[in-house]
Image: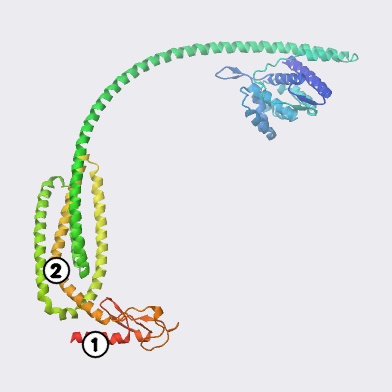
Amino acid sequence: MMEERANLMHMMKLSIKVLLQSALSLGRSLDAEHAPLQQFFVVMEHCLKHGLKVKKSFIGQNKSFFGPLELVEKLCPEASDIATSVRNLPELKTAVGRGRAWLYLALMQKKLADYLKVLIDNKHLLSEFYEPEALMMEEEGMVIVGLLVGLNVLDANLCLKGEDLDSQVGVIDFSLYLKDVQDLDGGKEHERITDVLDQKNYVEELNRHLSCTVGDLQTKIDGLEKTNSKLQEELSAATDRICSLQEEQQQLREQNELIRERSEKSVEELEKELELQIGMKTEMEIAMKLLEKDTHEKQDTLVALRQQLEEVKAINLQMFHKAQNAESSLQQKNEAITSFEGKTNQVMSSMKQMEERLQHSEQARQGAEERSHKLQQELGGRISALQRQLSQLHEQCSSLEKELKSEKEHRQALQRELQHERDASSLLRTELQQVEGLKKELRELQDEKAELQKICEEQEQALQEMGLHLSQSKLKMEDIKEVNQALKGHAWLKDDEATHCRQCEKEFSISRRKHHCRNCGHIFCNTCSSNELALPSYPKPVRVCDGCHTLLLQRCSSTAS
């Protein structure tokens, strides 16, 4: 090992000396094609490989000097740029190529000596990569670092792109150094002899390295033969496995065909069932349309009845009864959900009975109308008594309107609850089959029809009770209209048409505002129209002038007497 280190030291001295001499002749600027520079990198690579430990992997034995150079990045943060740029080069595939690129970049930065000095100072880290007697672990390493300091005077312009650093063969061209020895001065005979001896030692070292590489290649060939035999065994096992898989695939295909035939038969059966269900659905739609027509007709009659009831302002009692009926019907629905299937025949019979009752109710309504007409003729003498009760009826109407609004809100809340109950029942029915779902929808429609018929019967009964009140209220309204027309002899004046009060004749201003009399329609000041009375057209007390106030009081006193 000592002779090897000495030979490498002599070759490093020669390569650096020739490189410096050629660089001085060229002006200290070098490029990648310069032969002494290429030989310097080859010698440097041999020095870094000396005593390098062999790392075993699944491919074979591996000796790379890029591992020690990667330590520089951890020890010296300035070298991180070199390491990242080397890793980012896509054309570098091996660790040898990355190590050569690292040497190129370090020489261009003129910090090759500094980086190697940092490595040699941390020999405890280098011991993982080098043998104890390696060149980098002995004193010769520091000598090489001292020689490399002289290269900082050179300017190297090296281009890494396009360079095949992975496959280059590191062989030293001794012709450069032999020629250099012949060109030396005659007075330096001793130095020339020592240089020849150094070249001889390096040639011996090169031969030794070549023999080592041949041995490494032989071991790699043996390893490849072993891996080849293993791969052949695995290939035979894989072919057997492929045959078994093909047999399984054939069996799976046969099973797939059987399953496909069965699925086709089941699909045909399902299509037939679907056609039957579609026919049933069309029949149900026709029945739905007929029911909708019936419901629309009933709704039209209900609208007419509601308009008449709104004129009377007495629908509050009827809505209260409807709310009670709706609550009872909701309870009946909740109880009857579980027993819908056994009650279809009863519902159909009840529908027929309801239709008969509807016809009877229509006949009863006609009789009620005739009776109401007779009552209108009989009640001609009770006009004066109804006029006294007119004011009371207006007050009752206002209160009934408020109660009607509250009852309407209550009814809407009940309808919402009814809708929630219907949604819950529909969600439960969707879990059954399609045929059962269609039947249940039909039952729901029939129930709705029955409810509508019940509502119609209740409204017809209410109409029979309210017929008398309707005729009486119409007579009262006619009397009120006559009185109102008699009192309202003047039209409603506009604000621009009056500039003075009609009674006191004072001029209107910002402090004296204009006020309309709700009875005569003229414009007065606040003092002349401070009275309030309940008029037939207004359910609440409103502003009237002094003249209308006295007139209306006289009118009321006369009617009361």
Which colour style is shown? rainbow
Q: Are marks 2 and 1 in contact (CB under 8 Å)?
A: no
Mark 1 belongs to which amino acid? Gln
Residue 553, percent from left and from top:
25, 86
Q: In this view, does 105 lie to the left or right of 329?
A: right
Q: Which of 526 and 498 is in front in this view?
A: 498
Left of 53 or right of it: where is 558? left
Q: Considering depth in this image, is 536 or 522 the residue closer to the camera?
A: 522
Mark 1: secondary structure: helix
Give residue 434's quadrant in the image: top left
The residue that label 1 is drawn on is 554
For the residue pair 286 and 392, the one nearer the viewer reads as 286
In the displayed structure, does residue 26 sit left or right of residue 84? right
Q: Residue 382: which numbered mark, if any? A: none
* Residue 323 versus residue 128 in the image, above or below: below
From the top left corner, tell me how far across and down residue 85 is, in percent: 65, 30
The part of the image, by quadrant, that contains residue 163 is top right
The residue lying furthest to the bottom in this view is 504
Residue density around tag 2, few if under 14, some if 14–19, many if 20 or more, within 10 Å? many
Tell me, yes or no, if residue 277 can be seen here: yes
Judging by the rendered image, the residue that carries numbered circle 2 is 467
- Which comes before the other along the chain, label 2 or label 1? 2
The Cα–Cα distance between marks 2 and 1, rounded to whole angstroms, is 34 Å
Q: In this view, does 443 lie to the left or right of 235?
A: left
